[in-house]
Image: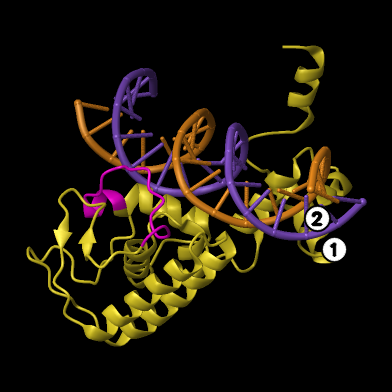
Chain colours: A yellow, B purple, C orange
Amino acid sequence: MTKKMVEEENKYKKGLWTKEEDNILMDYIKVHGEGHWNLAAKKTGLKRCGKSCRLRWMNYLSPNVKQGSFTEEEEDLIIRLHNLLGNRWSLIAKRVPGRTDNQVKNYWNSHLRKKLGFKKQNSNLGVSGLTNSRTVIVSETPITLSPCCNTSKAIEDEASISLQKFGKASDSQESEIIESYVNSLWDYSESNLEFSTPDGVLGWDFFDFA
DNA sequence: AACGCAAGCAACCGCATTATA
DNA sequence: GTATAATGCGGTTGCTTGCGT
């Protein structure tokens, strides 16, 4: 390792944030607002990179972040959203008020995955091809669900058609489609749901996004 | 009391995407 | 159109804490 590389590595502090660092960052954001994290890192004199400042604010310091353990309602919501979206933590977090993607991800990995008997898996579910099958593809044993609701199916079909229509959609287009799809499905599912499964393991509607 | 182990979580890393010059 | 910087995301790491022996 060259001297320059060592210098570069020592430029920024790593590890847990101290109370003092938190206060410095909060004071800065109170005055200047969020954003421009690299500038914030420089101006505050914190030996942290902009990325680290952003993460600290987003995941811990922001008044919008809810601390403490997850409620049953939140847990329920996360499970349902994960079944719809896969490991798209930021999308899931947007729908769990006060929770960050990191919180949701940690909670899923440390509590829910175990609880539900999910295998560890690399998944980028949720985007590249809605199918008409209703299969849980991330559980130990795939569960095929019987389609029992025309409205839900219609919403799913519409999302599928939209995605096909765009062909190779850009990420933002795709996100938009998924967003509206989830909204529709979510609104719908709030008032309905309880799909039957052959073994009764899970009681909601699942879609195979693979 | 001391040790080892596992769980939980904060933070880091690498990559992708978006914005700006 | 291209290069560079900034931001966002998801996977992973490693420290802390609690529990069992």
Q: Which mark is residue A32?
A: 1
SS type, badge 2:
loop
Please determine whether, in this image, residue A52 is positioned above or below residue A194.
Answer: above
Q: Amino acid at mark 2?
A: His
Query: Image point 81% across, 13% down: which residue?
Result: A3
Give x and y (percent) for residue A75.
34, 65
Residue A120 on the magenta segment: yes
Q: Work out how far the residue at label 1 is from the one at label 2, CA to CA, in angstroms.
A: 9 Å
Q: Is residue C8 left or right of residue A150?
A: right
Q: Please tell me which residue lies in front, A190 or A165.
A: A165
Left or right of A157, for residue C2: right
Q: Which residues are magenta?
A: A113-129
The residue pinned by badge 2 equals: A36
Foreground pick, A13 / A78: A78
Q: Is residue A15 visible?
A: yes
- Is A35 situated above or below C16? below
What residue appears at the point 66 percent right and 43 percent down from the top-left corner?
Answer: A17
- Give the letter of the chain under mark 2: A
Tag 1–tag 2 contact (CB < 8 Å): yes
Q: Is residue A131 magenta?
A: no
Quarter holding the N terminus of chain A is top right
Circle 1 SS class: helix
Amino acid, disc 1: His
Q: Is residue A46 above or below residue A112?
A: above
* Magenta segment main secondary structure: loop
**Residue under the image location 15 percent in, 51 percent down:** A141
Identify whether A184 is placed above or below B15: below
Q: How many marks?
A: 2
Instruction: Provide residue A58's location: percent of width, then percent of height.
Output: 63, 58
